[in-house]
Amino acid sequence: MNIINNLSSSKRVTTLVDLPIDIIINVLQRLPFHSLFLFNFICRSWRALLYSRQIACHMKQISDTKCTLMRNIGYSSWYKEDEIICRFKIPVELQSPELMLKPINGILCIIGPILSHVTYVYLWNPLTNEFKTLPRSKVQMGYVAISFGFGYVHTTDDYKVLRVIKHERKGDSHVEIYSLNQNFWRGVEDSCSSCKISGNGATSWA
Amino acid sequence: MVKLKSNDDKEFEVEEAAVIQSEMIKNMIEDGCATSVIPLPNIDSKTLIKVIEYLNKHINMGKAAETGEEDDLKEFDEQFVNMGWEELFDVIMAANYLNIHELMELCCQSAADRLKNKSVRAVREMLKITNDLTEEEEQEIINDAPWAFEGPEIDDTVN
């Protein structure tokens, strides 16, 4: 009986953030990006929802939009059915040409300049404006990055960036994988068995 | 008939066909644990009445499509979620506890519809939220996204 009394006197839910997390995710997934972004300004506890990785990995709103990076004025614009839904200041000065991979869970992976000896990779979450410049991998003379992939590993809640580097003259290529959790690039010996890169930069992880 | 008891000790009789929309009670019945009154320590009578109203209306949901009662059910759902925020949270928590998937979907969609395109001021007012952000914290992102506070889609009304 005591247990029952204790349960019944448990605090009544009066605001969204007090709901169980799976219910919060259920509600937030139904909101357009703009409404979700405004959570930043409601109050601290609502803003914290956007920063929670447990919640963020379910927010796919940005994934079905098209984005253009307007380098010259430092903004990115997001389109859905040819209508601008939002604009963001790009948190880094990009040098052309750059590449943006398909967003995953609302996280963007921007790469630039491509086909260069010094290629930077950035991860950016526009909802929170969290931004990270990935560490450079060990420079190998004569190699340039020719292809990139961006993926999420659900089991370890980890974001991974893959790149294929190729020697300019010798023509041999290697694959390197970056793990956000470990903040570290590692080479992949037998690259063909561990991952497969399709033409559009999408990557499947085996 | 299945008997349910709210946390304020009120008993309700519900048809088994209605109540088995709750996965939790369905499992109890299947396990033979529902022979007497089922106590629901997390749910007050006011909320339980709402939930039972929903269960009774949705009892023949599968048949609604055949008999052309879909519109009727849709209208019921629209009326059903026409309640205050606190009441909605109570029903959400009850639907979660009883594991009634369709009711949860309905309530979460209603919560999202109420928040959709609302201005910051309107959301705060609707849910009686006090702004505890510092001006610096607000400015941090405001500078990078001035569009967020503009546009015809922003709805400043409170309802």
Image: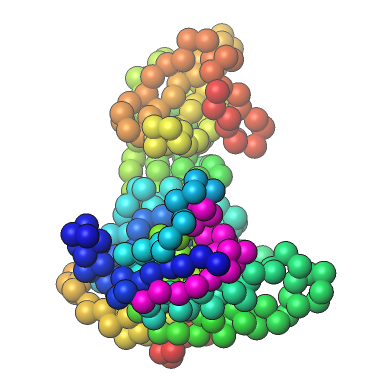
| Residue A81 higher or lower than A138, as above or below | below
Q: Residue at x 48, y 10 (%)?
A: A189
A99 relative to B40 in the view: left or right: right
Residue at image point 54% right, 18% down:
A194
- From what the image shows, is residue B45 above or below residue A139? below
Residue found at x 28% / y 60%: A48
Q: Of A184 and A76, which appears nearest the observer?
A: A184
Range of the magenta residues? B10-29
- Residue B47 or residue A30, whichever sits in front: B47
Q: Is the residue A95 above or below the residue B48 in the image?
A: above
Q: Position of residue A137 (x, y in %)?
A: 36, 24
Inspect this view and state whether residue A201 appears: yes
Q: Can residue B31 be found in the magenta stretch?
A: no
**Image point 59% across, 78% down: which residue?**
B77
Where's the N terminus of chain A, which quadrant? bottom left
Residue B10 picture location, percent across and down = 36, 76
Residue A183: which quarter of the image?
top left
Which quadrant: the C terminus of chain A?
A: top right
Quadrant in the picture for residue B37: bottom left
| Model colouring | rainbow
Residue A55 picture location, percent across and down: 39, 52
Q: Is residue B27 magenta?
A: yes
Describe residue A155's horizontal placement relative to residue A97 as left or right. left
